[in-house]
Amino acid sequence: MTAPSLPDSPAFVSFPGAVRPARHHWVDSYGVRIAVCEWGEPGAPPLFLVHGGSDFAGTFDVFAPLLAAAGWRVISWDHRGHGDSDHAALYSWDADVRDALSVLDAITPDPVPVIAHSKGGGMMLQLAEALPLRLSRLVVIDGLPSPDPHPDVSDHEQRRFTRENLAQWLDHRRGAAANFRKPGTLQDLARRRKRMNPRLSDEWLLYLASIGARRDLDGWRWKLDPAIRFGGFGPWRPDWSLERLKSMPVPLLGLTATVEEEMGWGTNHKAIEPYMPPGGRLVPFADTGHFIHIEHPREVASLVLDFLE
Amino acid sequence: MTVFVTHNQVKLALHTLRPGAGPNLLHLHALGDRSPASVPADLESWPGPIYAVDFTGHGASTVPAGGGYTAEVLMGDADAALWMTGPATVVGRGLGAYIALLIAGARPELVRGAILCDGAGLAGGGDRPGPLNIRGVPGRQTAPDPFALVELASDLRPPDYVSRFAELAVQHSQVKPPIAVAARSRPDWLKAALSVPGVEELPLAEALRLLADA
């Protein structure tokens, strides 16, 4: 029997400049299977891209090929519970950083340049502090610490919790084993994502849904583990991150958004200037939201390539 | 008797140490420990049924791959157990004492008083981050999970965070005392909890007596 041709089949979805990775493989991080992907020549020098919270490596499908075309082997991965990586029993900031190190270690023992977006930036600042020998340079795209963190920070440093927040979080945990993400057409998923990313084009979001969702019998669902919940709470304090930033031992380039979004980090570049490490550089992008590398892929690639030279 | 309660991908072992009628008591064990096989001598005076849950990665509960432990997830373990037992007085030892405080603040309608006792993991990782430990913990995937021992021993407990949970418990609890500190150790987070009016220092036996009648 031939499968029916549906209008929301991913075979019909493309986006100008978007290129799927040339290679996919798996890395075992202490029993959690991490999906790793690569663009560019396998023998080229490695460069790593790190996605943000609730995202996945496919969000680099336009940006990564620009870096690969400049002669880099561009490597990214889906964090645990995201994209094609295993849904884990436990999620934490430290576990994400540990998984990141597992991926780096699987590719090379040498210092490598890393470009990280949003929560990925915070993770890489922690890795740079703990093991500065592993990073040669770090670019953080709207992910530097902020005195007023936004929900994308996840279960790490949300300070203003109430009884109601706690009860909702626990209710979600109670139901996590039986939760499924809401099914729909690819267009439905793109429309839902648009609520959080209003600046991104409908065409891009439809493309994103086609690579970040799976098709079940009752429709498409984002692959993101339904146990992962936007927002949360935890004991971390943003001033700890800001203090650490001052002594960051790896050359740092920070790109900041100027238009706040629901998924944004809320970083105000003027507020973090006093905390930048010696030689660190901040570049604010005017009239730009949280996904700077998606809104301006060529400009960001050009800045990054100059910084890596 | 042991039943298993689902918390995300983890099966939590919930043991009935003593069945019967009357007020419920839920025991939360210390870091690296497991639930006792029978009613401990210092809980014998409790007049009702006594339950005990093995935290994730401990005892007969699932040992998950790849770590990722936080005190907040263990608070979810306690919540899953309370969902089965119904409202209960919670007695926690060591790490379990800290979890008892968290769940008392988060589910004041289910926790009929929390009693905080000494035990492994009472201190936690202090109130500020120290040296970072990124590498994983190689070894067999057996209980107690080495990841749990490392990650929950460095769990941060800043005073304002801890006192917020204590305040919520005092504000919304239906019993007195909402939190009783029977531990003799005084890590900073416990001092912060004790600074909240309504949190009382009481010997375990006295706390059990008051809460059984509450």
Image: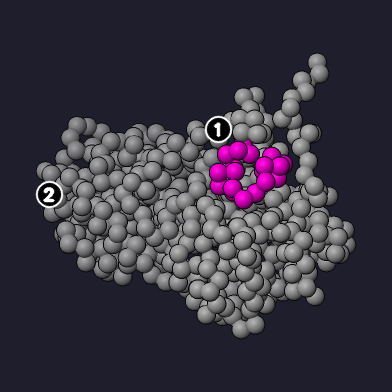
The secondary structure type at the circle numbered 2 is helix
Which x, y percent locates residue A34? Answer: 67, 50
Which x, y percent locates residue B181? Answer: 22, 60
Q: Is residue B74 magenta?
A: no
User: Gap between marks 1 and 2, in whole Å?
Assistant: 47 Å
- At a point 77% along the width and 20% down the height, the residue shown is A4
Q: Main secondary structure of the magenta part?
A: helix
Q: Which quadrant is the C terminus of chain B positioned in?
A: top left
The magenta region covers: A189-207
Which x, y percent locates residue A60? Answer: 72, 53
Out of A275 and A72, give the one closest to the viewer.
A275
Which x, y percent locates residue A107? Answer: 77, 61
Q: Which mark is residue B210?
A: 2
A107 with respect to B79 (left or right): right
Q: Residue furthest top?
A: A1
Mark 1 residue type = Lys
Q: Which mark is residue A61?
A: none
- At a point 65% along the width and 82% down the height, the residue shown is A279
The secondary structure type at the circle numbered 1 is loop
Residue identifier under label 1: A182
Q: Which quadrant is the N terminus of chain B positioned in?
A: top left
A41 with respect to A181 (left or right): right
Mark 2 residue type = Leu
Q: Chain of mark 1?
A: A
The answer to whether tags 1 and 2 share a subunit is no
